[in-house]
Image (cartoon, helix red, strand yellow):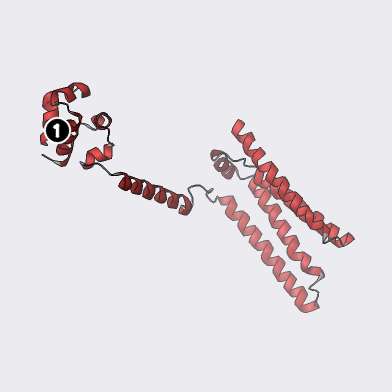
Amino acid sequence: MNEFGEFFCALRKEKGMTQAEIARLLGVTNKAVSKWETGESLPDTSMLKPIADTFGVTVDELLNGKRVNKSEHEEQKNEKEHLNFKEHIFSKETDDEKETFLDKVSGAVCALIVMCGVITYLIIGAVYNLWHPYWIIPAICGISCGIVGIIFDFFNREKRLQKLEKGQNPYMDGICGIIMIVCVIVYLILGFTLNLWHPSWIIFVVGGCLCGILTPIGKLMVAKK
């Protein structure tokens, strides 16, 4: 008699049922039940769930030939949930969008813009000592990178499909990017022309709040579709 057979027999006796009664309940012959208990054969996989339900155990317990106590069961459950959590956190391409070709091109263009801007700013600052007025060069490079990223994002069909599959609005990143770029431009204009650097920082708060409002609206629109 194997572990399965011994466990099956013990469960049947706990129920106070004969082999014939179990056979009728499961829709099999007495001989089949007898062979299960003696270890001569095992039930088909399709029978495991009905057997487990009949005896009030899990399929895993049935196959292991023993009951799992509550603490052990909770430990296994927690371990499984922990592994799933780790897989969710550390899997690079499970939930995040895969990097597309246009993403790489956009990144390369932005890197080139920033590098040229920084080099230009350093040269002008070191040679002509014009550090203060020309700090606008890195700012313009940052705005240019944002514009390039938005353009590539709007025309990146593969990335749009990835976001749609996750229930996200594929245009919201671009829209929020436009809002923040406008905020930066307005802030710089007000700072340079009216010297309103200090009070104008509120523009970024307004832009962030606007993006925070539009993002769930965009998700809702996708969900309705």
Residue at (74, 50) in percent of width and height: 207
Residue at (71, 60) in percent of width and height: 142
Residue at (72, 61) in percent of width and height: 141
User: Which image quadrant: the N terminus?
Assistant: top left
Residue 104, image quadrant: bottom right
Of 39 and 169, nearer the camera is: 39
Return the x and y of residue 40 as percentages of the image width and height.
10, 35
Of 193 and 146, nearer the camera is: 193
**Looking at the image, how many numbered discs can be counted on the residues?**
1
Residue at (80, 77) in percent of width and height: 129
**Residue carrying label 1:** 36
Say whether residue 72 is visible.
yes
User: Which image quadrant: the C terminus?
Assistant: top right
Q: Mark 1 falls on what kind of element?
A: helix
Amino acid bearing label 1: Trp
Say whether residue 225 is visible.
no
151 left or right, relative to 36: right
149 left or right, relative to 81: right
Return the x and y of residue 33 as percentages of the image width and height.
14, 28
Most extreme residue toward the right, as rendered? 194
In the displayed structure, would residue 65 be above or below residue 139? above
Return the x and y of residue 216 as percentages of the image width and height.
64, 40
Return the x and y of residue 60 as percentages of the image width and height.
27, 40
Q: Residues within 10 Å of mark 1 (few under 14, many from 20)?
A: some
